[in-house]
Image (cartoon, coloured by chain):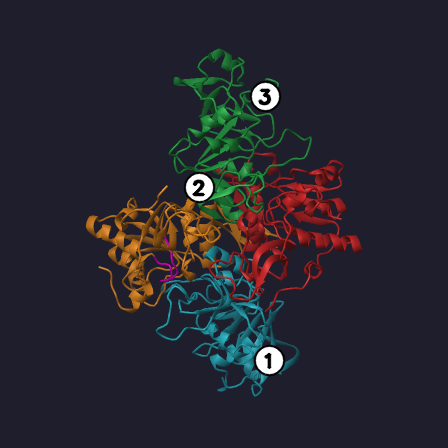
Chain colours: A red, B cyan, C green, D orange
């Protein structure tokens, strides 16, 4: 079993118009910039994929990564908890004129809905958002005298995530706080695509230290010198 | 009808349908035997409920590490690329549809796909383990079983009489006599022992066996 | 009423109520300042939503590791005994009641404990982050805030007019003028600036301030 | 912050009559034998704690650990998925004569209910057990055309678990498959008591490798040469 692919274009093959796409990372920490840019490259060359629903904690920063996808016109809707950033122009401009949709989800609910998608739990109850505008239209129920909101799982057609180490079977580790949503998204997507800083042979990662077991991973591409979104953003880089 | 496959032969047959690289959970007991019969060149990744992926054979006696066991509490070893995880993550794999195949034993399988394999009734101490999760999680749920009970009654039935493990969950049954698919809530015969007549097979089966296309010969080596 | 505490002084006062060894989440922005003012001999463990426990101060400029940030996307460092975990585990800590204290900012706090701190209405791009989870998770939810808005309107109110973050969740408010508890859906004044009269304080507060026992002097050093 | 305690008796202090107690381990793998035996010692000396509700995947094996607790008469009810073992006498004898209760829970549902308890999720839906005797009396609901059973969280007054490494702040690692239910139980109990093979200073465990963050742990006691339940059972050892 070898899940490695040789290049970024192959890694993101099969992500098509109208799909729901989870993208790992919290701000720039864990953002799979190279995979996202590979998808933008394809869009520029072929006009596809467009009309994507993108799930990420944020909605892009500057003119790179998810922001560059939005700028390019590939994103129909964001599902996120915090569509603001140091430089939120890309999302804000399109949102103000109704050219992009937004499903705003509390951060813990977003994480738990993705976790539920991967774990086969179609719905769960949370105290979060009870009595607020974000619970509007959702079923509520009382348990042990306290009120809770019913939330549904989130799944996706594909996930793009960034790992530190991967073995060829897809077992993954992450780097520091870059872990964030990625292990959850890996489990919740039909097609999980990983860019790893280094790919090792099976057994090259201690079984105790694997964070995402390979069963949740479909494709791995090595990106040895991955760029950091925050660094690019601070340098004023625009993609394309 | 004295000729039938041994348990090892049933396990061998089931193993032929497991693709290279498939993620597989084998129920405790008889189904564990399937792992021995992977065809050359194919390597499945075996999952055990208690938090290990890609485990291998039992270690030699005396070399057991009792922190490294499978769901049947037997000592196991690891293959390269193995991973440990906790029970909630383990059943996220199961319930979340990440396993390609689960192979379980059965007391009864009904033509509507219902499975009974955890309780023989109100006597004794009930125990369910992970079976009820497995039948609703894996992409393909197969059963391996003798075709009839020890006293000769059919195990493939119209409707289960014993307490259910899952509703409409089984899609293929490997027995000591035949390979039967469950499609649209009916048994469809795919393979039978070459010398066994359809009439004799039907007589030991508790619901109608449909035929849809050719019936293959169930030919299994001595194993 | 020109005299009032600075933001740093409000943060200092809030920090005095955090016990040694407490697990604490500080909201992004102003509340982050509380970490600076831990009393000598006490060490809280700080949690950030994006998957770190026991982080420390920001690194010097130029030494940032942008994979190591807090919920406000600021670069952080680790203390000995820090741990990384994913977002679902992070919010299990929040929602599961494992944090001892969460300290948040506010647009409005109502006497019934309702908090509004995420949206100023339908204009602009809404953003909620982890605030709605934090207010229903931590054992104690406190607010730090100026006592009034920039244009002088009360932030402690009878009922919130802005979209709610959480219902009945706040138990203590540290303001630029006073420390107020919320008990049985009423504001109870615990401390006020020594020179400030109760009448003047009441006049800039949008709901009745109850007095239950002595009112302490809110005395904060220059910080 | 130092969560270490000096001895086993102190570690299990405060576990009292009628409490609900989670005990880590799957069979002998991860069973915190020394903590369990310390609780039995107290019961023998004082007659307490008794009337316990014990949550564990199994219901004891041989005459040690949970089986010895049952033999001693400390356990009113077991919540487990598989109350059978190589030598299930202790539970079976009492169960047959109605001296011990049983709540039988499918293994994945047991794990998820404990996980929900720790994560503040009061209820969730699972396909597991739908249409079976074990779903009797539970609410059901349809999502996307499929039927699911509503399950409630499980919490406990205390948890006894076995770790490999602990630092003094309570950060934990586990050994191989001994991890199983323990990280879930640590989060779901009000009082989490850990026996660790080795206690190290904060920073002595790589932050990337911590499985249970210290926020979920209350007390740690070092048991350097912990016994293995399976080995004791095979040697025919009876406790007390």
Query: What residue does disc 2 label?
Result: C98
Q: Main secondary structure of the magenta part?
A: loop
| Label whose residue precedes the other's in the sequence (3 or 2) | 2
Q: Say which element carries label 2.
A: loop
Could one spot residue A180 in this view of the protein?
no
Residue A120 disc label: none
Mark 1 neighbour density, 10 Å: few (under 14) some (14–19) many (20 or more): some
Front residue (pair D44, A3): A3
Residue A189 locus on image (x, y percent): 62, 56
Query: What residue does disc 1 label?
Result: B191
Q: Could you tell me how far apart the alpha carbons at marks 2 and 1 are, in whole angstroms?
A: 57 Å
Residue C213 locus on image (x, y percent): 37, 18
Front residue (pair A240, D121): A240
Query: What residue does disc 3 label?
Result: C149
Q: Quadrant of the N terminus of chain A?
A: bottom right
Residue C7 locus on image (x, y percent): 53, 25
Residues rendered magenta in the picture: D22-31
> Which quadrant holds residue C146?
top right
């Amino acid at each position: 079993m070898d899940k490695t692919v040789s290049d970024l274009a192959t890694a993101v093959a099969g992500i098509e118009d109208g799909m729901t796409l989870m993208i790992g990372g919290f701000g720039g920490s864990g953002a799979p910039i190279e995979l996202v840019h590979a998808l933008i490259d394809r869009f520029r060359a072929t006009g596809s994929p467009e009309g994507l629903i993108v799930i990420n904690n944020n909605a892009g920063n500057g003119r790179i990564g998810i922001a560059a996808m939005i700028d390019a016109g590939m994103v129909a809707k964001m599902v996120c908890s915090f569509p603001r950033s140091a430089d939120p122009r890309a999302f804000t401009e399109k949102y103000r004129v109704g050219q992009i949709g937004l499903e705003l989800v509390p951060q813990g609910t977003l994480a738990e809905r993705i976790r539920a998608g991967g774990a086969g739990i179609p719905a769960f109850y949370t105290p979060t958002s009870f009595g607020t505008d974000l619970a509007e239209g959702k079923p509520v129920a009382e348990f042990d005298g306290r009120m809770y909101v019913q939330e549904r799982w989130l799944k996706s057609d594909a996930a793009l995530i960034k790992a530190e180490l991967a073995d060829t079977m897809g077992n993954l580790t992450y780097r520091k706080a870059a872990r964030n949503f990625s292990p959850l998204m890996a489990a919740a997507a039909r097609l999980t695509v990983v860019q790893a800083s280094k790919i090792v042979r099976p057994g090259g990662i201690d079984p105790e230290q694997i964070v995402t077991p390979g069963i949740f991973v479909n494709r791995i591409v090595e990106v040895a010198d991955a760029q950091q979104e925050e660094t690019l953003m601070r340098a004023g880089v625009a993609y394309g | 009808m004295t000729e039938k496959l041994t348990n090892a032969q049933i396990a061998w047959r089931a193993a032929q349908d497991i693709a290279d690289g498939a993620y597989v959970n084998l129920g405790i007991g008889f189904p564990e035997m399937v792992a021995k019969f992977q065809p050359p060149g194919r390597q499945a990744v075996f999952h055990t409920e208690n938090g290990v992926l890609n485990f291998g054979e039992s270690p030699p006696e005396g070399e057991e590490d009792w922190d490294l066991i499978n769901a049947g509490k037997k000592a196991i070893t690891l293959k390269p690329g193995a991973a440990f995880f906790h029970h909630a993550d383990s059943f996220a794999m199961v319930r979340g549809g990440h396993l390609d195949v689960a192979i379980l034993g059965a007391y009864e399988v009904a033509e509507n796909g219902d499975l009974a394999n955890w309780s023989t009734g109100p006597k004794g101490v009930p125990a369910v383990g992970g079976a009820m999760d497995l039948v609703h999680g894996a992409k393909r749920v197969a059963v391996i079983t003798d075709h009839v009970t020890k006293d000769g009654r059919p195990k493939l039935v119209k409707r289960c009489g014993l307490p259910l493990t899952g509703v409409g969950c089984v899609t293929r049954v490997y027995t000591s006599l035949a390979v039967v698919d469950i499609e649209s809530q009916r048994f469809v015969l795919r393979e039978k022992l070459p010398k066994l007549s359809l009439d004799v097979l039907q007589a030991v089966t508790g619901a109608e066996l449909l035929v849809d296309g050719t019936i293959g010969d169930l030919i299994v080596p001595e194993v």
